[in-house]
Image: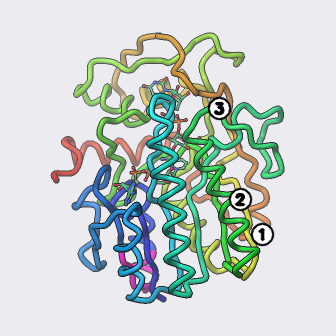
Amino acid sequence: MKFLVTGGAGYIGSVMTKQLVEAGHEVTVLDNFTKGHHQAVLPQVKLVEGELLNAQRLKEVFKDGFDGVLHFAALSLVGESVTQPERYYRNNVVGTLNLLDAMREAGVKRLVFSSTAAVYGAPEETPILETAQPRPTNPYGGSKLAVDQMIGFEAAAHGLAAVSLRYFNVAGASGELGEVHNPETHLIPLVLQAAAGSRESVQIYGTDYPTPDGTAIRDYIHVEDLARAHILALTHAQPGKHEIYNLGNGKGFSVREVIETARQVTGKPIKAIETDRRAGDPPVLVASSEKAQRDLGWKPQKPELASMIADAWNWLQAHPQGYHD
Ligand SMILES: NC(=O)c1ccc[n+]([C@@H]2O[C@H](COP(=O)([O-])OP(=O)(O)OC[C@H]3O[C@@H](n4cnc5c(N)ncnc54)[C@H](O)[C@@H]3O)[C@@H](O)[C@H]2O)c1
Ligand SMILES: O=c1ccn([C@@H]2O[C@H](COP(=O)(O)OP(=O)(O)O[C@H]3O[C@H](CO)[C@@H](O)[C@H](O)[C@H]3O)[C@@H](O)[C@H]2O)c(=O)[nH]1
């Protein structure tokens, strides 16, 4: 089949593209390279350097004809979104509205969207079920929730077969593809940069959370397990329906536990400095992925935090400067 992957030059979209190509599909990547990397785009795919906010150009891209769209392109930093909410809503919501318009006009009826645990805010119950009331604590989560709702109404009105996958914290690497954000703000890559010596230390944002060791807890999922869930979602999507699935491992790790695991995996002393909380961060996000396991038959193959950190560490050692764009 023929798929469009928006944001396919980014961290998760590039791993997704690789899995689609390996499964024998034809892939076009659309990316504006505000965050993406040319080196992360496989030579087998067609690359369109394009912008979701350019509605006219997007419609031209759809003249190629696609069987479905995997929509990763977004701005996705919690902290940044707090200071620039308008940028997040414009890019993520208006960008997706343009995408839905182009899909409808071209008759493309299948969509898998990268939603996020950030839509839940600080939920009352852990692990988080898809039925939990979404109450985002930051504009990033707010923009993704708006898109989830938009897709739900689009599916009902126009027969789109749609799935929103609400990822928890994605980690690890896949062969030649790894996590490089510029600037990097994610915990695991920063911890590993400190292990590698390219950064002196890592900061712990907040030690007064209502958690056993006072630091925030997240549920980490391997990027390869995550990408495999998209292939299952594509095949299970039903016309006129919008399904939502949480994707995580159902186990939370505190910031201190992540740093300690990285010390064990790398054998390096990693200097950690305690600082204030980062604005917009909820204390605990842990998934129940039972719905995905039951309905999609999804089963994580690399659920251990240590194996995610080990894959990310091996990748960093092979690519100490990240990608060379
Ligand atoms: N990394 C995580 O832990 C995580 C967790 C939950 C959800 N997500 C979601 O998964 C998706 C991918 O995340 P990632 O970590 O790979 O991010 P990323 O920044 O590495 O990739 C996103 C890509 O989208 C492109 N892009 C952004 N806006 C665009 C636009 N307007 N037009 C065209 N291209 C555009 C960027 O250049 C980048 O290559 C995002 O939607 C993010 O919100 C990520
Ligand atoms: O230098 C750092 C960086 C992060 N953290 C903490 O580590 C945790 C994880 O932070 P980070 O890796 O930045 O991820 P999140 O902010 O949890 O967000 C990620 O996970 C969300 C889903 O849970 C996604 O929606 C986002 O796109 C993705 O960036 C948080 O408690 C942070 O406060 C630190 O203590 N020090």
Observer-side mark, 2 or 3, equals: 3
The residue pinned by badge 1 equals: 295
Q: Residue 212 or 80: which is nearer the viewer?
A: 80
Of the residues tagged 1 and 3, which is closer to the observer? 3
Residue 34 coordinates in the image, percent (x, y): 30, 51
Q: Position of residue 254 (x, y in %)?
A: 60, 26
Q: Is residue 238 above or below residue 153?
A: below
Q: Position of residue 298 (x, y in %)?
A: 67, 66
Circle 3 sits on which residue? Answer: 137
Spatial CA distance of label 1 from label 3 is 29 Å
Q: Quadrant of residue 19?
A: bottom left
Q: Is residue 73 left or right of residue 177?
A: right
Identify the residue position indicated by label 2 in the image. Answer: 245
Q: CA distance from mark 1 to mark 2?
A: 9 Å
User: Depth check: 185 or 215 in front?
Assistant: 185
Residue type for callout 3: Thr
Question: Which residue is pictured at 44% across the width and 32% down the height?
Answer: 80
* Position of residue 127 in the picture relative to residue 324 (left or right): right
Between 309 and 53, the one nearer to me in the picture: 53
Task: Identify the residue at horizontal 54%, vertical 21% (top origin).
Answer: 256
- Which secondary structure lies at badge 3? loop
Residues marked 1 and 3 touching at CB (< 8 Å): no
Residue plotted at (69% across, 80% down): 158
Q: Look at 56% across and 87% down and name the residue there.
A: 107
